[in-house]
Image (tube, coloured by chain):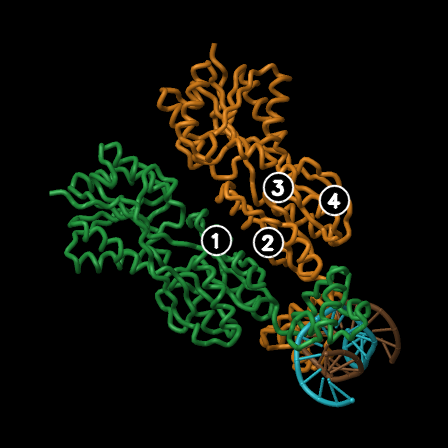
Chain colours: A green, B orange, C brown, D cyan
Amino acid sequence: MTTIHEVAEAAGVSISTVSYALSGKRPVSEKTRRRIEEVALSLAYEPDAGARMLAGRRTQIFALTEPLRADTHAPTHMAFVLATAVAARRRGYDILLLTDEQASDGMNRVVASHLVDAILVLDVAPDDERADIARSMRTPTVFIGVPDDWRGLTCVDLDFEAAGCLAIDRLADAGHVRVTLVGQTEVAYRKSNFPRRLLRGAQDRAIEREIALDRVTSGESATDASAVREAVEAALARGDRAFIVHAVDDVHVLLLDTLAAHGLQVGKDVSVVSAAASFDTSTLAVPIDVIPLVPQQSCELAVDLAVRRLEGDDLAARVHLIPPEYHSAGSVVPARG
Amino acid sequence: MTTIHEVAEAAGVSISTVSYALSGKRPVSEKTRRRIEEVALSLAYEPDAGARMLAGRRTQIFALTEPLRADTHAPTHMAFVLATAVAARRRGYDILLLTDEQASDGMNRVVASHLVDAILVLDVAPDDERADIARSMRTPTVFIGVPDDWRGLTCVDLDFEAAGCLAIDRLADAGHVRVTLVGQTEVAYRKSNFPRRLLRGAQDRAIEREIALDRVTSGESATDASAVREAVEAALARGDRAFIVHAVDDVHVLLLDTLAAHGLQVGKDVSVVSAAASFDTSTLAVPIDVIPLVPQQSCELAVDLAVRRLEGDDLAARVHLIPPEYHSAGSVVPARG
DNA sequence: TTGAAAGCGGTACCAC
DNA sequence: GTGGTACCGCTTTCAA
């Protein structure tokens, strides 16, 4: 393997010059710098990770903790993992996976051994045990999601409450007075942090705008087809002609199917808004308005905050809510009669 | 932070004794060993990862490369990632995620910088570019999946060919002479390594046993409901009463639905075998025979092989095929008339 | 603008 | 059974 000594010798300089030339932490004459870079390249020199960790104080590794709950939606979850890894790489960091059910052990271990520079937390629970650990550690920790008690934490997420408000507003503006929220599974409202946040936003705003808001869940399992169908049909029977969907793709399909089966045309007879969907809604049978949840956006910001906190920016240590955006596709129409 | 020096001082011994006591690489008197362990525990001592990498020659990290193809089945994929991480942890290794589209760069980088002890490769393509890289490296690399050209590689996987044979055998034994294989998507047969292996096994054995084997795919997208329904109906029209399913859970549901819709009872009027399913088939509406694909099994073996190769066991460097197991649930019945 | 050298915190060899 | 110590390869201070 190639060491910094070999590079130094081949370039006819000292190892410190090589180090500085490559890190740019000290001015090096243009000429020698280029020579060193050439040599390093031709020798395929790559600094030894261990030596670097030991001498410097950075590992260029972030831990990513994700409790392996069987009931999380795999595609969404994977989108966040990948987005995090890609964002981290762009900033020069690798991702170390921490999948312990008891995430606590893993976090403490990688911190105690100085394996990582920072920790990113996925799939945050309302009463997440990792919150206390984060507060007790010096290692910067960024939550992608907001636990109930976020005091002293650095969090990133879509502003789900605002998204809920936004969805209600658009439907209210269109004259709807009865709205059905096709939501997540019951277990998601208990174990996850974001479904309840969106719900709260929608509920509060519904009261303000004097909207009758009903919530139906997609049953116990993620795609309980009959449960969704029946719930939608009940809503239609009540006279609801406005729907907010905060659910996985399958539920969207079910909703649209059911509406079509009743001869109702989206964007004409009924209004539909998809809230906080992390998949591509343009592949659905009918174009629908959407307030997207973009994993890349959250994850990039999370990585950015981790880096900033490593650089000593303590102002980054707070809750960062990403304002929702409304993308219109003509699926919301004025209420009839 | 706690260093080995502090532990040594507190225990009244030298640092080498601490090192040996903790690693067990040299006999240490029962008494001192216990004292050292107590001190280490009370001081929450954890060896510095960087120092360890530098001094020892091990990082206790495995890289896991997974090209981010959008068309892989997320739940299955995640099951493999998690199973790998869990298996690795049990052997004292952490997992570093490598998601570069051009996995090559990532592999070369982590190897050149000595960041990882070995590499695990997921989602193997028939002509996987990572095969050549693996051959050109000294770092042990284990493929979970078998590329077309596996010369010189260490691979682990379910014996899909044998699984295909086994499925055909059971149906043939029951007297079926016409079988339909409800397979994967077309793109999976092109880009993945295992669907074609199962197909080949089934085809070969079908010829041997003089079975007419038809293959239908689940369309272009993973769950093209109508495509699957039509294909199954066409098979029924042909008179087929035996099905092998090698597909995701949704397709299983569709198949069973369609059969039920035609008044056919599984385990009575028709025979069904699920081949290489990585999900829990017991949650399906009807119990069906299954030749399971157990991610934990493959991943555990993969980690084991990586460790063995690190220990110098070159005999581990070959293709390891896990023999398929047939779990009967009464869904295969003698062919009628 | 560049070089020499002191660590960083372990591992493992060599003595005792 | 235990201790002393020479590295491992790099970063960074101090000097020139």
Label 2: state its secondary structure. Answer: strand
Looking at the rendered structure, the kind of residue marked 2 is: Leu
The Cα–Cα distance between marks 4 and 1, rounded to whole angstroms, is: 31 Å
Circles 3 and 4: CB atoms closer than 8 Å: no
Q: Is residue B30 visible?
A: no
Q: Position of residue B5 (x, y in %)?
A: 68, 79
Q: Which residue is mark 1?
A: A68
Mark 3 nearby-residue class (10 Å; few <14, some 14–19, many ≥20): many
Residue type at numbered disc 1: Leu
Sequence-earlier tag: 3 or 4: 3
Q: Is residue A213 visible?
A: yes
For the residues labelled 2 and 1, the Cα–Cα distance comes to: 20 Å
Instruction: Residue B317: give its label.
Output: 4
Horizontal arrangement in the rendering, residue A13 relative to residue A55 (left or right): right
Q: Please determine if labels 1 and 3 lie on a single subunit.
A: no
Q: Looking at the image, is mark 2 or mark 1 nearer the viewer? A: 2
| Image quarter hosting the N terminus of chain A | bottom right
Numbered label attached to residue B124: 3
Q: Are marks 2 and 4 on the same chain?
A: yes
> Is the residue A46 above or below the residue C9 in the image?
above
Q: What is the chain letter for disc 3?
A: B
Check chain identity for marks 4 and 1: say if they share one: no
